[in-house]
Amino acid sequence: MARLAAFIVLLIPGLFAAGGIKLMRDALYGIVFNPFMVGWLQFLVGFILFGAGLGFFAGFLLHRDRKNGRVQQRFAKKKES
C-alpha cells in the first residue's frame, strides 16, 4: 500500500511536468490555447509547471536516498554541532 501511495505522489508532479513540456512545445510552434492569449505567457506557464514537477520529483528522490543513506557525502545532511 505504501508503494502505491508513493507512486501516486510521484505521478501527479510527473503529469504536471509532461503538461508543461507540451505547453512549451505548443508555444514554440505557435499553437496558443484559449486561456493564455499570447504565446510567451503559455511558454512561461509551461516552464513553471515543468520546473515545479521536476523539482518535486528530484526532491522526493533526494529525501528518500538521504533517509536510506545512499547519497554522496556532499549531499548528506550536515550534522548539528
Image (cartoon, helix red, strand yellow):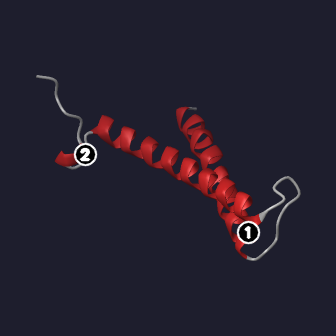
Q: Residue 11 location, x and y as percent?
A: 62, 47
Q: Dividing the picture into quarters, in which one does residue 75 lie?
A: top left
Q: Residue 50 location, x and y as percent?
A: 59, 55
Question: Which one is nearer the viewer's eye here, 60 or 21?
Answer: 21
Q: How many marks?
A: 2
Q: Could you tell whether 69 is left or right of 58 in the image?
A: left
Q: Secondary structure at mark 2?
A: helix
Q: Secondary structure at mark 1?
A: helix
Q: Is residue 62 above or below residue 20?
A: above
- The circle on residue 53 is none
- Mark 2 = which residue? 75
Query: Which image quarter holds the C terminus?
Result: top left
Q: Amino acid at mark 1?
A: Ala
Question: Which one is nearer the viewer's eye here, 33 or 54?
Answer: 33
Q: Residues within 10 Å of mark 1 (few under 14, many from 20)?
A: many
Q: Is residue 10 above or below residue 23?
A: above
Query: Which image quarter holds the N terminus?
Result: top right
Q: CA distance from mark 2 to mark 1?
A: 36 Å
- Mark 1 = which residue? 27
Q: Dividing the picture into quarters, in which one does residue 8 lie?
A: top right
Q: Residue 76 location, x and y as percent?
A: 23, 40
Q: Residue at x 16, y 24 (%)?
A: 80
Question: Comparing marks 2 and 1, which lies closer to the viewer?
Answer: 1
Q: Residue at x 65, y 63 (%)?
A: 21
Q: Farthest residue toward the top?
A: 81
Q: Is residue 38 above or below residue 62?
A: below
Q: Amino acid at mark 2?
A: Phe
Q: Residue 16 location, x and y as percent?
A: 66, 50
